[in-house]
Amino acid sequence: MTESPDSPVDEESCHRILRALDIIGVRWTGPILLAGARGARRFKEYRALVPGISDPQLTLRLKQLQSRGLMERTVVPSTPVQITYALTPDAEELISALQPLSHWSERNLPTRSET
């Protein structure tokens, strides 16, 4: 049975939401997913689209996203070896699910310069 959007969230759903927030709440996760949605495929492209992130931090976050099934890493056998990263369908679904939250925050939260 599908619950309507106005139905109260049960305890198990609440725990799942908290686990999802644990994933997206990790620093740099949002900007990395956004970079992937904007077409980044190579490490340098991600670094260019995520200003302020260090190489070790980007490496760590890409590995974490890969282990969560949100990022796919492909090794292209060439000289030199090329490694590409792409969003998985789950990551694309997550980004779509976050759109309403983004719209809500635009309407209800001040910008960084206003805080």
Image (cartoon, rainbow, N blue to C red):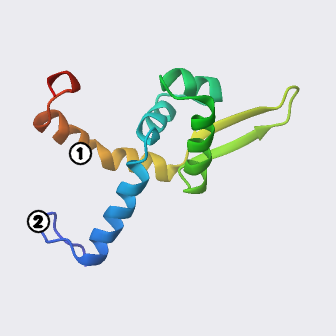
The vertical placement of 85 against 64, above or below, is above
Q: Mark 2 points at which residue?
A: 6
The vertical placement of 4 against 113, above or below, is below
Give the numbered dot on residue 67: none
Q: In which quarter of the image is the N terminus?
A: bottom left
Q: What residue type is labelled 1?
A: Leu
Disc 1: CA contacts within 10 A as few (<14), some (14-19) or many (>=20): few
Disc 2: CA contacts within 10 A as few (<14), some (14-19) or many (>=20): few
Q: Which residue lies furthest to the right in this view?
A: 79
Q: Which of marks 1 and 2 is nearer the N terminus?
A: 2
| Element type where label 1 sits in the image | helix
Q: Which residue is drawn at 16% across and 28% down?
A: 115
The vertical placement of 17 against 9, above or below, is above
Q: Mark 1 points at which residue?
A: 101
The vertical placement of 99 against 8, above or below, is above
Image coordinates for residue 43, horizontal then vertical, percent: 64, 29
| Element type where label 2 sits in the image | loop
Q: Distance between the residues labelled 1 and 2?
A: 16 Å
Relative to 111, 13 lies left or right: right
Q: Residue at x 54, y 20 (%)?
A: 48
Q: Dividing the picture into quarters, in which one does residue 78 lie?
A: top right
Q: Nearer the viewer, residue 87 or 48?
A: 48
Q: Residue at x 14, y 30 (%)?
A: 110
